[in-house]
Amino acid sequence: MLRPYKLALLAPLLAGNLGCFLVEAYLALEDEAETPAPRAEPPPVKLQPAPKTKWTHMGMAYLRFEVESLPYGAEVRLSLFDGALRLDAIKLPVGTVLECSGLKYEVIDEPKSHQLLVPVDTQLANEKWETFQKERFIELVKVDWKIPFTVTLPGYEPVEEVSPPLPASNLIDGRFEQIAQGKSMWPGEDGPPAGEVPAAVAWVHGSGFAALGTAGTVADVRFVTTVTAIPNNRTKRCTGYVGAPDFTATAHDETIQIIDRFTREALAEKTFQGRPSCPRSVVSGPNYAPSSDSGPSSKAMKKWVRSKMSKLARDASTPPS
């Protein structure tokens, strides 16, 4: 484009052919000078093949990266807790990207651990109730949901994996505790469905979660327990420990309720007494005095809950519309 002041300088030449020629030549030079040169595209970065990995299992699952430049223990740890699949990037370099179920997390600094939380309410709601009855101890129960995820280290092709079987006791225990407190329901629920209610109860207690009764899926279970501890005045003197002083053991009672998770109504209630007992061994030290506080037998409490399940299920069942 010709600047106005330059046009003014050329004005005397505009009257003749020579002026026209010079103006056209100048305009051509002006346009050529102002056209920016095309920018050269940087060459594509060549990524190294996806690094080798190895699964290890120590309660949780660990996907370890076998890369010489990474520190020992560079890995992704997978666990189920608080309604989510947790992916912890441990000792992985800045720029590492975790992706799962449409969620993405990038390591942007260098603390020891970075976390991606992936909700798994739908998977838990659809899990078979009997899954949580297969093991004698709930801590041994695992779920195998095979959730795909990728880990991309800087300069490498992505590692594509699926979640292995993972312990689920903390997941289901915490989730039913939230439900018992009325904080949330399962995805897609807006009220109690019509039809037959299964004779099943989610046992939520400090002794550990238990799946009582028979139901199709976790979301089918309508009843859940709540427990309230009540101090009592029962005590017992405990003596004869080697290397530890004598102490007084205490006890507490517990009131258990079976509630309908939809209506929040307590359908059955009973208080069980706890009696003090002296443990076989105690821990003692300069800043720690031995102690013992006993509650009622969870076995007796579960027996009472089981005795109520069938009637509660009949009373809550409604004919389908």
Image (cartoon, rainbow, N blue to C red):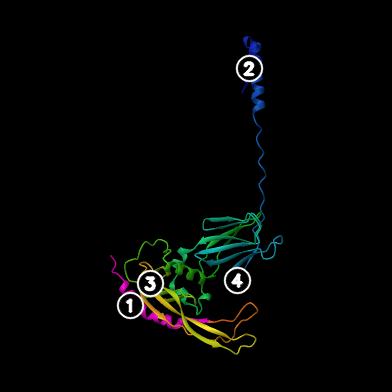
Q: Which residue is mark 2?
A: 7
Q: Give the amino acid type for the residue marked by disc 2 in the picture.
A: Leu
Q: Give the amino acid type for the residue marked by disc 1 in the picture.
A: Lys
Query: Disc 3 or 2, which lies upstream in sequence?
Result: 2
Q: Which disc, if any, is residue 225?
A: none
Q: Nearer the viewer, residue 163 or 25?
A: 163
Q: Which residue is mark 1?
A: 311
Answer with the quarter of the image where residue 71 lies. bottom right
Quarter of the image that includes the N terminus:
top right
Does the magenta segment cover residue 30? Answer: no
Tell me which residue sits at (55%, 84%) in the image. Answer: 248
Query: Disc 4 or 1, which lies upstream in sequence?
Result: 4
Q: Which residues are magenta?
A: 293-321
Q: Which secondary structure is most common in the magenta stretch?
A: helix
Image coordinates for residue 212, horizontal then vertical, percent: 42, 77
Image coordinates for residue 182, horizontal then vertical, percent: 41, 65
Q: Name the outermost residue toward the right.
A: 68
Q: CA distance from mark 4 to mark 1?
A: 43 Å
Q: Which disc, if any, is residue 57?
A: 4
